[in-house]
Image (cartoon, helix red, strand yellow):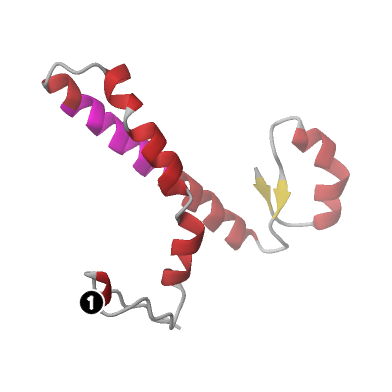
Amino acid sequence: MLHAGDRAAFEANRAALGLLGPSGFAGDDAGPAAVYGIAVLSGTHGMFSGFLQAVALARSEGITAAEVTARPVPWLKAAAGALRPGARAGEPGVRVGTAQETGVAVRSFDSR
């Protein structure tokens, strides 16, 4: 869980909060903590939605959920390793490569 607000209150209650699971402090402003929470839930939602779609497709061909799960799990573990290096591409002003170099046109900009 990610907490924000009064750091002294967080520190005073860290042990109790730790009983609920891993706990961290995101700063005085609640905004970033909310964004981190939404980011985690968005990624989780996408993963599980994709998994349920895969199971539905597999079942339409007589493949069990257990059989179809065996294939994407190793791939998902490997793909998760690309998240941190790939995140740099989303930073303002970062040039990822030309469409000819990557096969995909990527443009990043600062919306401020």
Residue 106 painted magenta: no
Residue 35 locus on image (x, y percent): 53, 57
SS under mark 1: helix
Q: Amino acid at mark 1?
A: Ala
Is 68 situated left or right of 76 in this image? left
Is 102 situated left or right of 37 in this image? left
Write down the region rendered in magenta: 44-57
Tell which of 80 and 107 is nearer to you: 80
Tell which of 44 and 81 is nearer to you: 81
Q: Answer above or below: position of 89 versus 84.
A: below
Residue 67 locus on image (x, y percent): 28, 19
Tell which of 35 and 58 is nearer to you: 58
- Residue under circle 1? 99
Is 37 situated left or right of 80 in this image? right
Q: Residue at x 45, y 55 (%)?
A: 82
* Quadrant into which the N terminus falls: top right
Q: Answer above or below: position of 66 versus 25.
A: above
Q: Residues within 10 Å of mark 1 (few under 14, many from 20)?
A: few
Indicate the quadrant where residue 17 lies: top right
Is 61 situated left or right of 69 in this image? left
Q: Residue at x 76, y 30 (%)?
A: 19
Residue occupying the far left of the picture: 61
Tell which of 16 and 99 is nearer to you: 99
